[in-house]
Each structure stands twice: as structure tokens, then as C-alpha cells.
Image (cartoon, rainbow, N blue to C red):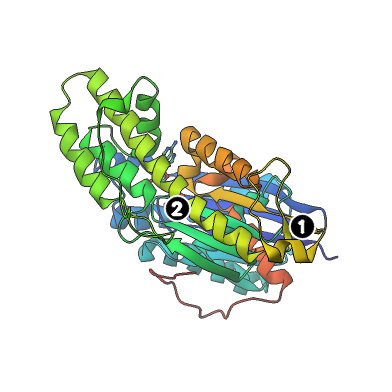
Amino acid sequence: GAVLTVLGLETSCDETAASVVRLSAAGAEVLSSVIHSQIDEHAAYGGVVPEIAARSHVEMIDGVARRAMSEAGIDYAALDGVAATAGPGLVGGVMVGLSYGKAVALARDLPLIAVNHLEGHAVSARLGAETTYPFLLLLVSGGHCQLLEVRGIGDMSRLGTTIDDAAGEAFDKIAKAMGLGYPGGPALERLAEKGDGSRFDLPRALLGRKDCDFSFSGLKTAASRLAQTCETDQDRADLADAVQKAIARQLAERTERAMIAYVEQHPELEQAEGALKQPSAAREAIGPKSKALHFVVAGGVAANKTIRRTLEDLATKHGFGFLAPPLIYCTDNAAMIALAGAERLEKGLTSDIDVAARPRWPL
Ligand code: KG4
Ligand code: ZN
């Protein structure tokens, strides 16, 4: 098959990132992945300030993109396309990367591929690992919390989503209430290591519902209130542990529902040996299967070790292969955008040069 080399650009939040990825029959190879984090510029405000983010992207994008090209050791003439995040995200930032991508595409006469940031996270498990379609995906980041059935690039359907906050947003807001600074997820995870949250009784959301939707606002409110009652470092560590476990538990509960439904709907996919087998006439009728069940967790919150472990146990229980991208590809990066761009290019799914940045863009 063809070998496709794509420059990817990511500017939808607080990372200015560029990467060169080469896609061939052997899989995806990351030739470079440069990330400039703006965390220091936003930390004083306790969250991302859109205006500061957009200005910083303008300052950084050219240098970051040039570095990605030089670290990849290739000339622009060796590129087959330019991919840029076109949304969803902070639209001022999205416009910076997308405009830069358009300029490179025009100047070098390359196809432009507008990439949905969520689709980037969805394919990130294919970076540095051999992950084949189809798979069940839990996408958990600062902005999103969704369960998706991923059949291929541009071919995904949603099984569940959050009705209020995203899981990462819950981590960040609770961490902020506890005085842990921004971004809160990693800080809260570190604090939780020394804690025992068993004395806290945090609310469980949407208990009566049978769907795969998430809700974190009740937990956020309750935990933020409890944060005001914490007096010692031990109190705060205990609360951090309780919060982390509550978020992990909700993610696991909804993911388990999605797994059970997915197994039922895909009798053609094999459950791994030793799993809790779901008896089904459809599964038996099909006989030997050619493909296995795969579960992928991606997005910044997938960096959380407790959450990873909980989900891995769940995948094993239900006979899914468990896959998580390397940590560097869990949080925002441009390699996932370059790969999504290369996979789209392979299918001929390129974009018009006047494609618009979209603050909201559901998959
Ligand atoms: O995917 P990402 O880099 O950006 C978005 O597209 O949102 O995810 C960032 C989110 C933040 O909310 C951050 O607190 C969370 O991922 N996060 C974590 C951890 N590392 C990052 N949450 C919990 N535990 C972690 N170790
Ligand atoms: Zn993201």
C-alpha cells in the first residue's frame, strides 16, 4: 500500500503542538512530536484563559511546526498532506492552527485535512501500538467524556456521553476547590496516593438509569463542599482518594454497560479466553470468529493509573483486549491529529481550503 507522511497541527486548547507521522501497511510511525505547553501562562488564573491561549498559539505555532519538520528530518516536499484540528475547542486557538495549516497547504500545494480533535483522541491508541478497528472506546479528557463504537476513521457512533461535566473537568474543578492548582488531575492523583477515602460518602450519579451516560456535577458540588471542611493534609489526601475512586467507579459502571451491549451487538467478535462469557444464540450461530473484541481508553484522564487499572480489570472480565495509548499520546498532542489526517487522506477525505473552525463539533 501507499506510504503517507503528514504534518499535524493541534491548537484547540492550551498546547501548541506539531508532529510528523508516517502511515504505511506496517502501521503508524511518529517521526516527531513537539508540544509547547502553556500551563505556566494559565496556572495563575486556575484554568485556561482563551484570549491568552490564542495569543500564545500565534507566537508559538511557526516555531513549533518548523521544529517538528526538522526533528522529523524531512523536507516539506516529502509531505503528502497537512492536517489541523478544526474543532471542537477554543475557537480563537483552533483558528490559529487551522490558518497555519491552510497557509502551508497553499504554499506547498498539499491537500488539507481538517481533523476533529475527538477523532484524534480516538485514533491515538494506534500510535506506537498495533491497534486494529473496530474497537469500543472510552474517551475521557478535560472537555469530553464519551463511549464510542469506532469502526474506522470517520465511522464512529456514540453510545453514551456526559450530561454535564467531563471527567477531567470534574478532576480539575474539585482540585481547584482543594487548592491544588491547575491542571488538577495529576495533582489530585498524587495526593490520593497517601489517602484513604473510605470515610467519605460521595453521591453516585444517575443510579436508576440503564443507559451509558455520565454525570459529574453532583460529585463536583459535594466534593467541593467537603473540601471546605478539610483541616489537615491527611483530610485532603483522604478526600482526593474518595474523589478519584468515585470517578473511576462511575467510568467503570457505564463502560461495563457499554461492553455488555457491544458484545451482544457483535457476535462476530471473539471474547478472550477466561472471560465472563455472555451466552447468546447469535454468538453460537456464527461459530469461529476472525477478530477479537478490543477496548481502548484515550484522553488525558486515561493517564490516571487507578482509572487505567479499573478499566483494564473490566476489559479482562468481559473478554476484551485492553489498549491504552502511551501516556504522551493520552494528553493533547499533534501526532494523533497527524495520524487521523493520514487515515483520512488514505480514504480521500480531504477538506476545502475554506473549511471553518468549529467551537462545537460532535462526532
Ligand atoms: O486530553 P487532554 O489533554 O485535553 C482535553 O482535550 O481536554 O485532557 C486534559 C485533562 C485535564 O482535565 C487533566 O486534569 C486530566 O486530563 N488529567 C488527569 C490526569 N492527567 C491529566 N486526570 C486524572 N489523573 C491524571 N493523572
Ligand atoms: Zn484533548
Q: Which quadrant of the figure has residue 274? A: top right
Q: Is residue 201 left or right of residue 79?
A: left
Report the amino acid beneath label 1: Lys
Residue 100 pos. (x, y %): 52, 65
Q: Which residue is mark 2?
A: 254
Residue 325 in sight from this viewpoint: no
Residue 231 pos. (x, y %): 15, 21
Q: Which residue is mark 1?
A: 291
SS for dot 1: strand
Residue 187 in sight from this viewpoint: yes
Q: Which quadrant of the figure has residue 241? A: top left
Residue at 50% across / 46% down in the picture?
331
83, above or below 199, in the image = below
In the image, the residue with mark 1 has its CB under 8 Å from the nearest atom of ligand 1: no
SS for dot 2: helix
Q: Calculate the distance from the C-alpha at mark 2 to the C-alpha at mark 1.
A: 24 Å
Residue 142 pos. (x, y %): 39, 50
| Mark 2 vs 1: CB contact within 8 A | no
